[in-house]
Image (cartoon, rainbow, N blue to C red):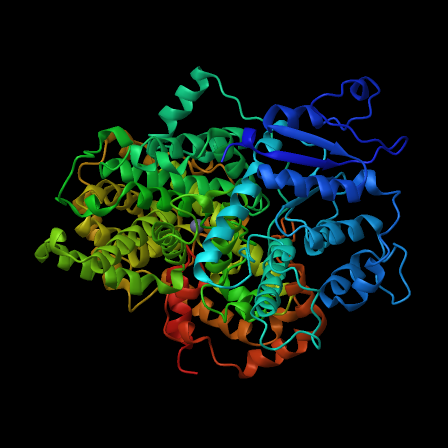
């Protein structure tokens, strides 16, 4: 579909002098300054643009045009402010429970009709037109940026809401609405044969679902398939929008992304470097970096049929970057870009990128990575950049403990990961990416979707050990099986596991980056964890040592994380993909540096002093020994920089860490005892009254979660601290549900070891 083959009817009523013109011929009105300013852009993009000032005429004209070419109706709500409300809408609203519910909270200032429902003429017109136009998508535009007003428009039947002014790049994507509705319509026609239900309810507004009268809970016939679909999907759509409304920041206005060829070369060089650091770039450059990485795979002929244009990709990336909360110290867009670039680097090491190095004529699989097709690689990259979208800055455990609506919705399983995946797919749909690969009903799109979802869900660290086990089994399989003999199901399973292993490595790759980078990331993560701890303390929730700013020791946390979490994963993946050994070497080198720092800063008795975890010290020692052996080839300059003062190595100050470093005389055994004492305190009430919390950077957690806690759950939680047993994963001492990159593994294990009996 090409926009030049499409028509747009614009319903715009000049406040001063209503008129109707055919936009292609009338230039007088332009001189009179009575055209909306976006008309010129519309005319530059679409084949036919017709301005109408009368809603009834606009409706009729849209119907006529749609007989000839795909037609979209754009309603300028600001220009409809002074119009009369269509008569019949009063009666209609009286019976439409969804609309009444939606509007009653947000439109209280508007005049109401006799039954108490709102009577904003603009909304009434949207509803009337959308109900009568079953085949033409309705898009509304306005300068009103109130989220509730926007939602009301969508609930009234608009398929999209555009904020004015309408820039050219927004107008250029308008035809995708037409494309999507037509594709969905086709998809649905084939799946529900004989039904008059013409279109996908998820992608299109409710007026597409049926031409029948509005439903009520008492009036629709129980056997009406159409009404059943409407009932189910309408609510589903509202649920999705409500979640997005609560958790995802509103998108910023997109702006043109231009880049000079010289700057492009600089960024291109950067994305190929293992020393890449997102903090070196501003947000615009980060967006360019993401674009340049995707460009490496989208040039492949196998993906050319996707037809993803430069502007479309930039718009998507800008929107996705807005879906991250900047105020999170760690889980923000920079982390997403870091994971993406890391994965890109892995794929380069594996010979899958950049695309022109791949042997596209390959007819058999020689290496495990050969089974990853361009669409898998594209899906994996999309998963990487979207894998933490809308992260609220608190972990799954916090959401479970505070019984947030999100935790209830996802039954405490992979809550955040489910949110990230859902958010990403909302944006994929919004930007028309769900139309590629044959549309969302095709098998290749379903495979692509599964790749993305599986990859994102694999980043749930509560499943870490399960994945490591599966990857080890895969490594064993790879020694014996012939990949070319696998059936399609088995091959797909191997693909998904490869993708899971790679994205998991990328997600915790901080510990494999050059030390200066690794250290900075570690400090940011600790900062986010202790901010959560502050919040937990304020809410009267138990605070784990990893979230307690008075207990976290950076060196211990990093040593523990490498020894008990990261090394095992990377070595398992290395067995499947030997090209990943460079990352293992980097990690082992970093481990040596953390140990060196721990020994020199904490004043332990000797370098042989066991870690604070008696049960795990042997494993840690073994890992450290292995690291010593494996990192013999570390570059000289890396070794010599070990002695650099802490102040010079640290760019972000973490108060507690410094305090701990300088405390000096506490040996490791004393630490165990001290931690035990604190655990006892934590499990009592002492900390509840301690409000020395610093909310200097409150993570943007869902407001409902906090309100629930403060207003109604405080007493319940306080009581449950005494009686409630630990979470099952805590009792097992699993790394698991606490967060995606727990830096305090050692201390956490101590906690579990000591307090397991009850
Ligand atoms: Zn992540």
Please state the total of marks drawn on the protein image: 0
In the picture, measured across the screen, residue 575 lies left or right of residue 559, that is left
| Quadrant where the image shows the C terminus | bottom left
Q: Position of residue 324 (x, y in %)?
A: 55, 46
Between 657 and 409, the one lying in front of the other is 409
* Horizontal side of residue 330 vs 355, given as left or right: right
Q: Residue at x 57, y 37 (%)?
A: 175
Task: Tell me which residue sits at (72%, 26%) in the image.
Answer: 23
Instruction: Please name the residue shown 46% across and 54% down the image.
Output: 187
For residue 177, which quarter of the picture?
top right
Residue 374 occupies quadrant:
top left
Place of residue 723 in the rendered image (x, y in percent of width and height, measured from the top left): 54, 84
Residue 333 visible in the shown view: yes
Please give the name of the residue rendered at 68% of the width and 32% of the height, measured from the top-left corner. Answer: 166
Position of 159 relative to 469 (above/below): above
Task: Give percent across and percent down for residue 249.
Answer: 62, 47
Left or right of 142, for residue 2? left
Q: Could you tell me residue 176's position as x and y percent?
A: 54, 40
Q: Is residue 141 visible?
A: no
């Amino acid at each position: 579909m090409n926009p030049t083959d499409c028509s747009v009817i614009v319903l715009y009523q000049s406040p001063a002098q209503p008129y109707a013109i055919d936009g292609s011929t009338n230039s007088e009105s332009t001189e009179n300054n009575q055209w909306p300013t976006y008309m010129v852009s519309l005319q530059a993009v679409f084949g036919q643009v017709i301005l109408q000032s009368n809603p009834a005429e606009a409706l009729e004209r849209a119907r006529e045009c749609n007989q000839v070419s795909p037609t979209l109706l754009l309603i300028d709500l600001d220009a409809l402010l002074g119009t009369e409300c269509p008569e019949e809408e009063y009666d209609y609203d009286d019976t439409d429970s969804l609309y009444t519910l939606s509007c009653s909270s947000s439109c209280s200032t508007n005049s109401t009709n006799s039954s108490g429902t709102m009577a904003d003429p603009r909304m009434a017109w949207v509803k009337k037109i959308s109900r009568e136009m079953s085949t033409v998508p309705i898009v509304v535009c306005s300068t009103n940026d109130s989220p509730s007003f926007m939602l009301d428009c969508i609930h009234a039947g608009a398929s999209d809401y555009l904020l004015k002014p309408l820039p050219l790049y927004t107008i250029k994507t308008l035809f995708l609405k037409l494309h999507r509705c037509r594709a969905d319509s086709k998809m649905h026609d084939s799946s529900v044969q004989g039904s008059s239900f013409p279109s996908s309810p998820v992608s299109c507004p409710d007026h597409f679902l049926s031409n029948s009268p509005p439903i009520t809970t008492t009036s629709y016939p129980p056997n009406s398939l159409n009404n059943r679909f409407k009932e189910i999907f309408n609510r589903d759509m509202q649920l999705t929008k409500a979640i997005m409304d609560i958790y995802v920041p509103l998108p910023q206005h997109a702006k043109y992304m231009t880049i000079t060829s010289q700057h492009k070369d600089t960024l291109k060089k950067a994305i190929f470097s293992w020393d890449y650091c997102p903090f070196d770039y501003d947000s615009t450059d980060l967006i360019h970096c993401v674009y340049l990485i995707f460009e490496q795979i989208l040039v492949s002929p196998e993906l050319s049929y996707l037809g993803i244009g430069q502007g479309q990709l930039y718009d998507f990336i800008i929107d996705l970057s807005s879906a991250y909360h900047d105020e999170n110290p760690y889980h923000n867009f920079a982390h997403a870009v870091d994971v993406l670039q890391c994965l890109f680097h892995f794929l380069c090491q594996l010979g899958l990128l950049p695309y022109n190095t791949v042997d596209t004529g390959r007819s058999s699989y020689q290496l495990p990575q050969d089974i990853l097709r361009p669409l898998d690689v594209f899906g994996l990259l999309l998963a990487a950049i979207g894998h933490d979208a809308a992260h609220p800055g608190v972990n799954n455990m916090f959401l479970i403990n505070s019984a947030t609506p999100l935790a209830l919705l996802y039954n405490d399983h992979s809550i955040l990961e489910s949110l990230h995946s859902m958010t990403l797919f909302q944006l994929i749909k919004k930007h028309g990416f769900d139309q590629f690969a044959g549309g969302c009903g095709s098998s290749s799109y379903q495979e692509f979707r599964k790749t993305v979802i599986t990859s994102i869900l694999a980043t749930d660290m509560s499943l870490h050990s399960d994945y490591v086990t599966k990857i080890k089994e895969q490594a064993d399989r790879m020694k014996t099986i012939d990949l070319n003999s696998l059936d399609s199901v088995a091959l797909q399973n191997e693909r998904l596991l490869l993708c899971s292993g790679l994205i998991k490595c990328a997600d915790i790759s901080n510990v494999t980056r050059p030390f200066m980078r690794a250290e900075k990331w570690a400090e940011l993560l600790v900062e986010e964890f202790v901010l959560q701890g502050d919040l937990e303390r304020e809410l009267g929730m138990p605070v784990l040592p990893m979230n307690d700013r008075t207990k976290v020791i950076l060196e211990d946390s990093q040593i523990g994380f490498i020894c008990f979490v990261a090394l095992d994963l990377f070595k398992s993946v290395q067995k499947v993909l030997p090209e990943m050994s460079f990352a293992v070497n980097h990690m082992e080198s970093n481990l040596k540096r953390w140990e060196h720092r721990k020994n020199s800063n904490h004043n332990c008795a000797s370098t042989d002093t066991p870690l604070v975890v008696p049960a795990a010290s042997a494993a840690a020692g073994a890992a450290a020994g292995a690291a010593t052996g494996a990192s013999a080839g570390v570059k000289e300059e890396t070794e010599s920089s070990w002695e650099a003062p802490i102040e010079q190595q640290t760019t972000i100050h973490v108060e507690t860490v410094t305090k701990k470093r300088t405390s000096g005389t506490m040996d490791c055994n004393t630490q165990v005892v001290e931690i035990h004492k604190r655990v006892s305190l934590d499990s009592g009430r002492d900390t509840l009254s301690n409000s020395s919390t610093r909310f200097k950077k409150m993570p943007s957690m869902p407001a409902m979660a906090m309100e629930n806690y403060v207003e109604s759950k405080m007493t319940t939680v306080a009581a449950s601290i005494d009686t409630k047993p630990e979470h099952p994963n805590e009792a097992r001492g699993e790394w698991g549900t606490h967060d995606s990159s727990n830096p305090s593994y050692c201390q956490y294990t101590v906690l579990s070891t000591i307090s397991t009996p009850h």
